[in-house]
Amino acid sequence: MKIRTAFMVMIFCSSALSGCTGNDSEKDDRIEALEIELSESISDHDSSLGQISTLEAALAESVTSLEVLENTVSNLTTTISGYEEDISYLIDQRDVLLHQLNVSEGNNSIISEQIFALESEIGDLEDQLLGLNSELTQKESQITNLENTISALGYTMSQLTHTISYKTESCPLGNPGYFMDIGFDDGQGLGINDDGKVTFEEVQTTVGECPGDFGMVYNQTTREHNWAQQRVVEMGGVLYFIADDGDSGWELWRSDGTVSGSYIVKDIRGEECETIQNATTGEDEESCTNPSSVWDRTHDGVFMPAEIVAGNEKIFFTAYNQWRDNTWSAADLWVSDGTEEGTQLVKDLWPGWDYFCCGQEFDYVGISNLLIIPSSGNNPDRVLFSGLQATYTNNEDGSGTGPTGEELWLSDGTEAGTQLVANIKPETHSWTYGDTTYCCGDWNGSMPRDLVLIGEQAWFTAETDDYGRELYRYSLGNSFGVGSGHYLVKDIMPGSTTSNPSELTKGSGGLFLSADDGVHGQELYFTLGDIFTTNIVKDIWPGENNSSSPMWVTKLGTKVIFSADDGTNGRELWISDSTNSGTFMIKDINPGNNSSNPTGPMKEMDGFIYFSANDGVHGYELWRTDGTEAGTTMVKDVRQGENSSLDWGSTAHWHGEYALAHGDHLYFSANDGENGEELWRTDGTEAGTSLIVDANPGETGSWPWWFIASGDKIYFTSWDGDQRQLWHYWDNPGPVISV
């Protein structure tokens, strides 16, 4: 019995449910296409058909065993019949000899011996016959059991069926579809036996996909609160982001790309109410609002965007949980496992401190510069961040310790596991509150920025009165107390003036950065982490106060690609292996002293770096390079002529990523002059570069931002002409079932 064959025949027959319309040829073609898709899908779902395969194998094995047993019983019956004939023949011989013995008057010893031998042989045959009859009874019992098993398996296989379901909760908004649930109508779990359909635990596998290659992912933002998802990260196949639904303010949300899997994780601040007097009636009335907990904020000219980073099992993010009786509050560190109950404040670094007290002037909005350290071995997900602890502690010696200033912290998501790890700028300032003078505290700190992780070393820039802003590193494996694990790598600009370290990028076994030593201007540097190996790589634009100002430093293999201005060729594309001779201009894309201005976000894919550049003829278009002059070419002139198709280069917080390498394609935002700014992709060839999603038809464009990949899909936000919402794109493998 070939159950799989019967199963596939049943599936193919069900293709008639597709409701194809049109002429017979079109119908036949569509049915044939659907049958092919279903056949391929069934092949892909073999692992999900384990129970069906097991039943099929069990049934086949039982049938085979039954055949073997029936043959065995037949052979036993024949053998028993032969033994019975032999015994009957021997008894006849014995009876003849007994007659001869009775009538004989001579010496009968020979006849007696023959009779004894025959009786012995008859006894042996009777013993064997008894054993064969016992074995026959056992085999007949096994046959009965197998027949019962085959009957039960046959009934179970007769329950194999399918149900066509229209599912909205399992798809994105606007992309619901039909799915074929396949299984046994046997009442398993919450299913109902013999109700003619498979549901709940009865389902063994599902065939079908949500229709279309792209669509809007469900969320609940209103038209008045339609700036959509921002700060999008991915963990465990789920997106986490901040969004304002018009009711709860900006809060932490999640989405798995389906209607049922898109919802707010936790309304951290919740509804806040106060009693106010109605100016008209004079009566007290309750006024309630639901303010945001996670949002971008500017204070005293300092802008601090909300931040979210994702590890393997935890999300870390910044949030304001309350204003504490209308007093000023700073953003604290929060952690979430994706559930409401698992979303908690990690540690309150600002417990009721009066921001405006004590005559101190400083600029601080909350913790920032979150750098995730994914879990490995026995270490859980951790996060490094820059934060100011605004507390006052009475020490045992009678002294006190005030605010620590903004310094480097490390947290594992628990209050006990959240510690200050690099107090670079000490607490040396006293202050007066009321009539009392306190000592000592610090309101500014070293303000760690530009954090980069290389192995067990965290690299960052920090600022002190003695050295200005310089390059530091911190060893995560340090266990010798606060401050013992951090090191000033080098005072590149000697004295208190900053060297302006930036563009920190790992490569060549160390770290590349841009810095100014006060002699060569802003140039490319390389370091292995100590004063001796921290040196200028090359003075690309020689001369005092001349700076090549390296930008968009991006790793390619062991080298880095970047843009720089040598004072002769304008700003062009360069490469470096950390040596002077190995640092050179790759190609003068815009010949002469004109700049092609290579711009990011620069993305690596299949050994090429993709970037935006202007060759002076085609405007800003998509280019790629493998680090050689011959391998540096324009991918496609998306917007014909001198007009530019790319508007890259911005690092503004509301943009997020607008270029993403995923699978065999680079996805990017571009404007071809006809469809506005929309989603494009390329495989690196001109022919393989095309518009794939026109979310806002017409010349206006949807301006897709916040690209991120999860599984086979990429997600992005787009403006559809009415709202900015979360969208997805993928190469839908099908089959898409229609009725």
Image (spheres, helix red, strand yellow):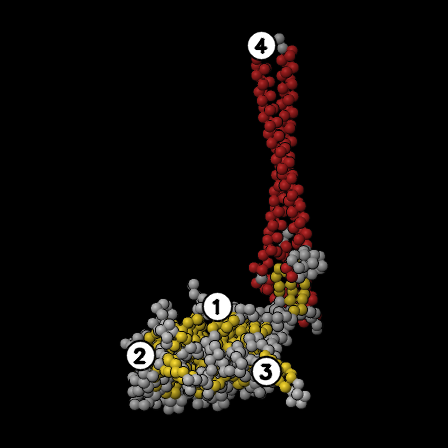
Residue 290, placed above or below residue 312: below
Disc sitting over residue 490 in the figure = 2
- Can you tell which of label 4 and label 2 is closer to the viewer? 2
The three-letter amino acid code for the residue at tag 4 is Asn
Q: Is disc 3 placed on a helix, strand or loop?
A: loop
Query: Is the residue marked by circle 2 packed among few (<14), some (14-19), or many (20+) residues within 10 Å?
Result: some
Position of 689 with respect to 286 (left or right) is: left
Q: How far is mark 2 from mark 3, CA to CA?
A: 47 Å
Q: Which residue is mark 3?
A: 226
Q: How far is mark 4 from mark 2, CA to CA?
A: 128 Å
- What x and y, as percent, mark residue 26? 67, 71
- What x and y, as percent, mark residue 338? 54, 70
The three-letter amino acid code for the residue at tag 2 is Lys
Position of 282 with respect to 622 (left or right) is: right
Among the two numbered marks 3 and 1 on one chain, the one whose residue lies closer to the N terminus: 3
Residues at marks 4 and 2 touching, judged by CB atoms closer than 8 Å? no
The three-letter amino acid code for the residue at tag 1 is Asn
The answer to whether one can see residue 156 in this image is yes
Picture residue at 51% right of the left edge, 87% below the top:
640
Among the two numbered marks 4 and 1 on one chain, the one whose residue lies closer to the N terminus: 4
Disc sitting over residue 312 in the figure = 1
Residue farthest to the left, as pictured: 532
Q: Which residue is mark 4?
A: 107
Picture residue at 61% right of the left edge, 27% below the top:
126
Residue farthest to the top, as pictured: 105
Picture residue at 62% right of the left edge, 30% below the top:
130
Q: Is disc 1 placed on a helix, strand or loop?
A: loop
Among the two numbered marks 3 and 4 on one chain, the one whose residue lies closer to the N terminus: 4
Among the two numbered marks 2 and 1 on one chain, the one whose residue lies closer to the N terminus: 1
Viewer-proximal residue, 685 or 675? 675
Q: How far is mark 3 from mark 1, CA to CA?
A: 30 Å
